[in-house]
Image (spheres, rainbow, N blue to C red):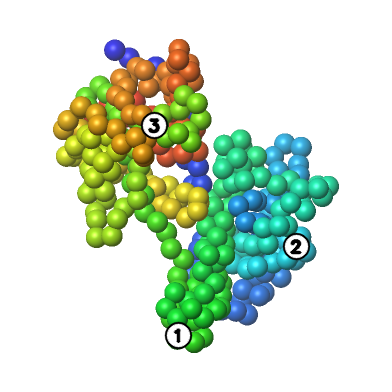
Amino acid sequence: MPRVDLGPQPLLGYTPNRLERGNEQRGNVALLTALESAPAAGAYVIAGELVILKQHERRHQPLFHPSTARALGAVSETVFLGLRDGVGFFGVGLDPVAAEELKARDGVAVFDLRSIAVQGIVEPEHLAPLAEAKAVLHWHRRHRFCANCGSPTSLVMGGWRRDCPTCGAQHFPRTDPVVIMLACDRERCLLGRQRRFAPGMWSCLAGFVEPAETIEEAVQRETLEEAGVSCDQVTYFASQPWPFPMSLMIGCFARARSVELTVDRVELEDARWFDRDEVSLMLLRSHPERLTTPPPVAIAHHIIRNWVEHGDRVFG
């Protein structure tokens, strides 16, 4: 039976990043200073959890010149994000209180990064560097002191390391790996709901990878813990940076070995099996009970859609 046409494939949020990371330039202070002062230089401005934008009739503009960005409020850190066509791009972190003050300023708009992505507030090419800036600047806000001896640390390497002058320890930005998976049983897939979800929205199960655990083991453990379903065959789909605050979502499919559900009501409000036709309606926002899947900005949407379109071929 032919499947419902789901339309063009949407973009995955916060990808791809068009900037060259420029690792070899990070330790060259003179070069970074020159790149930052160049007329074409760009800066993304983050104030705590919020992004500062220039207002525009169609889509707001997230890029400021670094000197203009620093004039918007008290600056905590400036980090080097990378290069594009030889032009330097930076993330400028403001004190979070600046966001409230800037909301009242003409020509300035203030949004959280999730709303920016879901609502298409900026051009898609800016989402990945905005995610990069937010994640790195968030790390700096939370790691100003040495975890080894407690002394204040200093920003070095363009913001990609903090050094302790007391004990010599070096600290690097962290990324937390998270598995997000769709357990499949022939023509059905397993979706769950958390209480914080929008009404009617169902999504893939997910959980953090624990120390000394493989991706496959994390997928199997989380599915068993949250829904009581055991899985055997785990296949990789794709990954997505998720700057809330600084995770890497590792998308997978898992073949279910059992179908009876035992839902962990602490982690989930509910979990249930859905058939492919019903999930198609959820993707199209035309389900008779107004059930939906996550928006295209989230990798969960793409995992679910891929299964609807390809069925068991997701296992190779």
Identify residue type, mark 2.
Answer: Gly
* Residue 163 visible from this viewpoint: no
Give the residue furthest to the bottom. Answer: 166
- Image coords of residue 265 (percent x, y): 34, 35
In the picture, measured across the screen, residue 4 lies left or right of residue 210, that is: right
Identify residue type, mark 1.
Answer: Gly
The answer to whether the residue labelled 2 contacts the one labelled 3, judged by CB atoms less than 8 Å apart, is no
Residue bearing mark 2: 73
Residue bearing mark 3: 269
Q: Is residue 315 above or below residue 156?
A: above
Kindly state the secondary structure of the residue where label 2 is placed: loop
Crowdedness of circle 1 by 10 Å Cα count: few (<14), some, many (20+)?
few
In the picture, measured across the screen, residue 290 lies left or right of residue 219, that is: right
**Residue in the foreground of this view, choosing between 153 and 287:** 153
The CA span between labels 2 and 3 is: 42 Å
The answer to whether the residue labelled 2 contacts the one labelled 1, judged by CB atoms less than 8 Å apart, is no
- Image coords of residue 51 (percent x, y): 65, 51
Counting residues from the start of the chain, the first of labels 1 and 3 encountered is 1
